[in-house]
Image (cartoon, grey):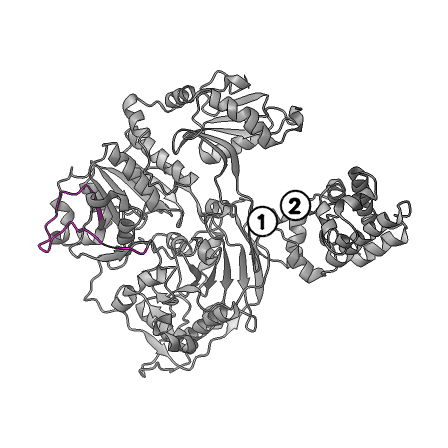
């Protein structure tokens, strides 16, 4: 057996794997092979949705389950022993793994990212791979763990036997938090993008600390009832009878598996708290308030809780005078963990000042790049009265006969102080047109409005635009706001992937945060969003991927310019496309490819003023205060303006670019010159491999062929679009080969085979003519078996030479 003839997998199974096991690593519990730790970026090109290649590690070694400490990158024996090191180091950085190995089956190169080894990188013999105890000893010394701290760090994760485990970034967050607490840190901030499983991450942190006996009484705080209820019946379900809700009213909730459970409560009708539970989940509005009698949290002693976890801590606890801060201050002796998708940093508010710098961050950009979060398109709609403003004529009166104040009204006024009914109807029509033009009127949709009254008018306008479907079921369009009990009762159905209704919901702020709307495909902004924090939360309503219903991306329609936040350097997850339809253009974006995702930052531009404290609704509001009177104006028409399709370039600038321009720029990044492309094309045994590489990078040539011409093969499309070369159709290329009499040296049957292959290229665009499987399809299958046809050329090598000569002739430059 020649070692250099073995595949990479052979090298792994015969040399690398056995060497690791001989060092004492358990093949069942400590070694995982071919670990795909990302999902592969979702690439949206018009109606074509594909996934990029997932990142895959050859070996990850765990000291205990979910405590990875080493990674091994394998190569076949034609490579040197250290050829996989750079790739392994890239993976190790992502996975937060300290010990990195590369091997070709002859030995190992060991890279110690901790810096504790005598040499940063060393060559090891095949039988000198370190044992689990050796690497853990190095890890323990690097972290400075005492035996007591080590026992906390090594506490097991929850495992239910289903095979579900944390994703790599969740493991990073959990382990970083546990280590920080083991070292005595009592204020901890975790930053994780919406839709990345903050609650599940929190559960595993709490579980390990609880099981280790280090945190015996725990409080989980949220600011939405639905968040608490969902958490109790789903992620926190394993806590069982040890868990209760800080509420006086019992409630029956449906779990994800369809079963129902009644939530246990820890407050009786006389508002007395049962202190016998260990895990408490609470709505902070239920245990505090402006009046002393509302501060139920004081029924606990200040030292009652060992651990407090605050979900979405940017909204309440970030401000010094916020209601949550009062609770945190009261229980100041407890370890406190803040979870947020958007760390809040302004002149007036800082949760980093309170919690400290994040122990771990996972951004929207990274979630989209890894394929765990859905990318999105943006449709920007400009309405004339928004762009130009509205100024009443002298003496003009409103619907009630009152004279309208003479000034210019703009988007900040519309639907807050002044209502133009035609504008509301136009928005409803455009949203409905989008659903109709996309041929799916049952896309779950959230329309964000200025306030509850605006949400009610928008509901009515949407009903009138969709009378046929509302006749079938009156819940097709619903308002879900804080004061609408009927609407709130349908919130569970809206977020349930199995429930058909409601489909379109209007809201003001209730659905902007925390609601797990997995199948939401359309988000509509008809109100200004001044806060970057809230904008990220709203975008987060759509970023969840739901593969069962084929929801891989979503669309955001912006009527108020809220998407100007994309220009803010704090925004970390730009859309794949921005489309601005004109008055007569369809509302659905055209089929275009996304911009390249290469991680370049957005340019620094003046950010929106975030000085306003971002508090949840209904806190410290004087209910006796009358809302401002709205002015209703009739007879004012509103129309759509603007006719641009725009994309964000790598520097974050909005540029107008055609499909051809986009493809040209992308190809020129891939191939620096025409000569570079020609060399690559000529050297590739499989021409299709080049096409597949481009598709993996999100650059499919199919949409370009639709525009340039379907009769051109990929070679001509690339040469013409990227390098301005003249084109030849497949028929013209085939005819040129025939004119040159390239095949006269072969016998009649061999020439017939080559002619049939040439015809396959001409008619169907087959470019990998050397694939033996092509000999099994008509008309070649009628000419003989593949073995018989190959024998007409002599040997298999002779056949391959003839095919390569044919392919070279196809792309030979004319004199």
Residue 345 visible within the image:
no
Q: Secondary structure at mark 1?
A: loop
Residue identified by numbered label 1: 596
Q: Nearer the viewer, residue 655 or 130?
A: 130
Give the farthest residue toward the top: 118
User: Which secondary structure dominates the residues rendered in magenta?
Assistant: loop
Kind of element beneath mark 2: helix
Start and end of the magenta stretch?
A: 258-281
- Decide if residue 21 is on the left or right side of residue 497: right
Looking at the picture, how far across and down is residue 81, in whole percent?
A: 60, 24
Whether residue 81 is situated above or below residue 439 in the rendered picture: above
Question: Where does residue 705 sit, x and y in percent of width and height?
Answer: 69, 59
Q: What is the spatial separation of the Cα atoms under label 2 and label 1, in whole angstroms?
A: 10 Å
- 463 on left or right of 800: left
Where is residue 288 drawn, in percent x and y?
18, 51
Residue 535 marker = none
For the N terminus, give its image quadrant: top right
Q: Are marks 2 and 1 in contact (CB under 8 Å)?
A: yes
- Compare residues 4 and 472 and report the one nearer the observer: 4
> Which of the two labelled residues, at mark 2 and mark 1, occupies the earlier sequence position?
1
Would you say residue 106 is visible in this rendering?
A: yes
How many numbered discs, if any? Answer: 2
- State left or right for residue 191 relative to residue 268: right
Density class for disc 2 (Cα within 10 Å; few <14, some 14-19, many ≥20) is few
The residue under label 2 is: 669
Relative to 337, residue 544 above or below: below
Vertical placement of 472 versus 727: above or below? below
């Amino acid at each position: 057996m020649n070692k250099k003839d073995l595949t990479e997998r052979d090298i792994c199974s015969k040399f690398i794997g056995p060497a690791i096991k001989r060092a004492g690593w358990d093949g069942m519990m400590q070694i995982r092979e071919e670990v795909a730790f990302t999902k592969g970026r979702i690439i949206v090109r018009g109606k074509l949705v594909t996934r990029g290649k997932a990142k895959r590690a050859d070996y990850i070694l765990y000291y205990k389950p979910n405590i990875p400490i080493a990674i091994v990158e394998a190569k076949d024996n034609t490579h040197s022993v250290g050829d996989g090191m750079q790739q392994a180091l890239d993976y190790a950085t992502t996975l937060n793994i300290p010990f990195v190995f590369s091997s070709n089956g002859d030995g190992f190169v060991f890279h110690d990212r901790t810096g504790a080894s005598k040499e940063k990188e060393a060559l090891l013999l095949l039988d000198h791979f370190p044992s689990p105890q050796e690497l853990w000893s190095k890890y323990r010394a690097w972290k400075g763990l005492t035996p007591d701290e080590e026992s906390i760090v090594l506490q097991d994760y929850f495992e239910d036997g289903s095979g579900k485990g944390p994703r790599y970034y969740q493991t990073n967050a959990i382990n970083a938090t546990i280590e920080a607490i083991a070292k005595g840190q009592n204020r901890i901030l975790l930053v994780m993008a919406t839709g990345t499983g903050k609650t599940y991450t929190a559960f595993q942190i709490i579980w390990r600390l609880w099981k280790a006996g280090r945190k015996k009484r725990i409080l989980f705080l949220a600011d939405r009832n639905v968040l608490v209820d969902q958490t109790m019946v789903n992620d926190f379900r394993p806590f069982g009878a040890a868990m209760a809700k800080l509420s006086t009213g019992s409630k029956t909730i449906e779990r994800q598996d369809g079963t129902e459970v009644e939530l246990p409560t820890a407050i009786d009708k006389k508002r007395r708290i049962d202190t016998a539970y260990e895990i408490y989940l609470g709505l902070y509005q239920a245990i505090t308030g402006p009046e002393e009698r509302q501060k139920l949290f004081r029924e606990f002693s200040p030292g009652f809780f060992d651990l407090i976890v605050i979900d979405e801590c940017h909204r309440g606890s970030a401000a010094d005078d916020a209601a949550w801060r009062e609770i945190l201050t009261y229980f100041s002796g407890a370890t406190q963990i803040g979870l947020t998708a958007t760390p809040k940093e302004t002149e007036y508010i800082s949760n980093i000042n309170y919690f400290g710098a994040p122990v771990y961050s996972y951004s929207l950009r990274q979630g989209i790049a890894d394929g765990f979060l859905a990318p999105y398109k943006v449709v920007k709609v400009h309405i004339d009265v928004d762009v130009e403003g509205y100024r009443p004529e002298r003496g003009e009166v409103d619907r009630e006969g009152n004279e309208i104040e003479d000034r210019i009204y703009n988007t900040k006024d519309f639907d807050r102080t002044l209502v133009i009914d035609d504008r509301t109807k136009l928005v409803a029509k455009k949203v409905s047109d989008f659903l109709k033009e996309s041929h799916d009127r049952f896309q779950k949709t959230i329309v964000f409005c200025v306030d509850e009254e605006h949400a009610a008018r928008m509901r009515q306008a949407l009903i009138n635009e969709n009378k046929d479907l509302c006749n079938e079921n009156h819940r097709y369009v619903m308002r879900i706001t804080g004061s609408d009990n009927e609407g709130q009762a349908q919130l569970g159905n809206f977020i349930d992937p199995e429930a058909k209704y409601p489909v379109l919901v209007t809201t003001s702020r209730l659905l902007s945060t925390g609601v797990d709307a997995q199948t939401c495909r359309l988000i509509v902004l008809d109100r200004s969003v001044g806060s970057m924090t809230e904008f990220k939360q709203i975008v987060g309503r759509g970023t969840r991927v739901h593969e069962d219903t084929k929801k891989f991306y979503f669309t955001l329609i912006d009527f108020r310019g809220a998407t100007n936040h994309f220009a803010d350097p704090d925004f970390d997850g730009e859309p794949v496309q921005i489309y601005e339809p004109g008055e007569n253009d369809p509302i659905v974006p055209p089929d275009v490819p996304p911009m390249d995702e290469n991680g370049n930052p957005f340019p620094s531009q003046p950010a929106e003023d975030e000085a306003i404290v971002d508090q949840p609704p209904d806190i410290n509001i004087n209910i006796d205060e009358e809302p401002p009177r709205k002015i209703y104006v009739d007879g004012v028409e509103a129309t759509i303006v603007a006719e641009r399709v725009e994309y964000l370039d790598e520097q974050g600038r909005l540029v107008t670019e055609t499909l051809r321009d986009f493809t040209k720029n992308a190809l020129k990044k891939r191939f620096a010159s025409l000569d570079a492309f020609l060399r690559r094309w000529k050297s590739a045994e499989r021409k299709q491999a080049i096409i597949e590489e481009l598709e993996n990078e999100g650059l499919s040539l199919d949409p370009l062929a639709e525009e340039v011409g379907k009769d051109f093969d990929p070679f001509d499309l690339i040469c013409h679009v990227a390098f301005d070369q003249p084109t030849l159709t497949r028929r013209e290329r085939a005819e040129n080969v025939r004119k040159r009499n390239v095949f006269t040296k072969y016998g009649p049957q061999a020439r017939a085979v080559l002619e049939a292959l040439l015809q396959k290229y001409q008619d169907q665009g087959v470019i990998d003519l050397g694939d033996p499987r092509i000999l099994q399809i008509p008309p070649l299958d009628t000419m003989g078996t593949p073995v018989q046809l190959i024998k007409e050329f002599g040997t298999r090598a002779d056949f391959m030479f003839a095919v390569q000569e044919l392919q070279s002739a196809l792309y030979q430059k004319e004199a």
